[in-house]
Image: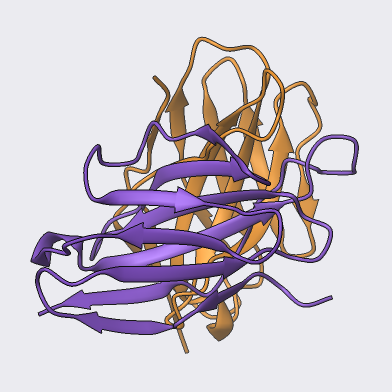
Amino acid sequence: NAGVMQNPRHLVRRRGQEARLRCSPMKGHSHVYWYRQLPEEGLKFMVYLQKENIIDESGMPKERFSAEFPKEGPSILRIQQVVRGDSAAYFCASSPGPGTTHGDTQYFGPGTRLTVL
Amino acid sequence: AQTVTQSQPEMSVQEAETVTLSCTYDTSENNYYLFWYKQPPSRQMILVIRQEAYKQQNATENRFSVNFQKAAKSFSLKISDSQLGDTAMYFCAFMSSPGGNEKLTFGTGTRLTIIP
């Protein structure tokens, strides 16, 4: 069973460009979470999605950031008009959902390191 | 809002020794989950151990065990017979569970170095 997959692993963008980060959850997982890790800090929650629905976006910046988890395909975290402060590691996690053993446990992908020049 | 505190930014221990990492949290909820994640130099986040607050028995996973003190809101991780591969950042995390599948709130981490 493949783990959570994220691509690209490294992404370099210039200020003002758009960044698209992709996450494919583990097989059978319908819940996806995005977290951001700034250098030398812990992970901070951004958004929680289920298929075609945003459940909790309380950690998302109000502007330039958006996320989706379509019926088909990976979850996408999109950052428009990137600034240097967006440089960070972005982690995706997935969980199976209620009704399964440890359905709440989140399993993480390897992360995408975004560098804004 | 819940908070998670890890008061030990860095620790080091000799190989084969036992080490305990501390974690405290603040919540008004009665039912919740607690986790320890490991982040080695590869930066991958790896689940180490999971504890449900309604269970009094401390969770164990091979060389890893926790000391869960609900009244004190303390959740420490003990690593026995430490190995070089245990060198990593360790993050304590909290999840409230009114319906399950909530966000994780992380502490700031403890950098653990195992000395050969």
Give me the residue at 65% from left, 51% from top. A106
| In the rendered image, the vertical position of residue B109 relative to residue B72, given as above or below | below
- The one nearer the camera, B40 or B43, is B43
> Which color is chain A depicted in?
purple
Quadrant position of the N terminus of chain A in the picture: bottom right
In the displayed structure image, the side of residue B105 where residue A69 appears, left or right: right
What tint does the image give chain B? orange
At 45% from the left and 82% from the top, the residue drawn is A8
The residue closer to the viewer here, B3 or B86, is B3
The residue closer to the viewer here, B77 or B26, is B26
- At x 42%, y 81%, the residue is B41
Corner quadrant of residue A49: top right
- Looking at the image, which is closer to me, B52 or B110? B52
Where residue B20 appears, as percent x and y from the top left, is 52, 53
**Residue A61: which quarter of the image?**
top left
Relative image position of residue A51 (x, y in whole percent): 68, 46
The C terminus of chain A lies in which quarter of the figure? Answer: bottom left
Q: Decide: is B18 above or below B28.
A: below
Say which quarter of the image contains residue B61.
Answer: bottom right
Residue B87: give x, y in percent of width and height: 47, 77
Is B38 displayed left or right of A67 in the figure? right
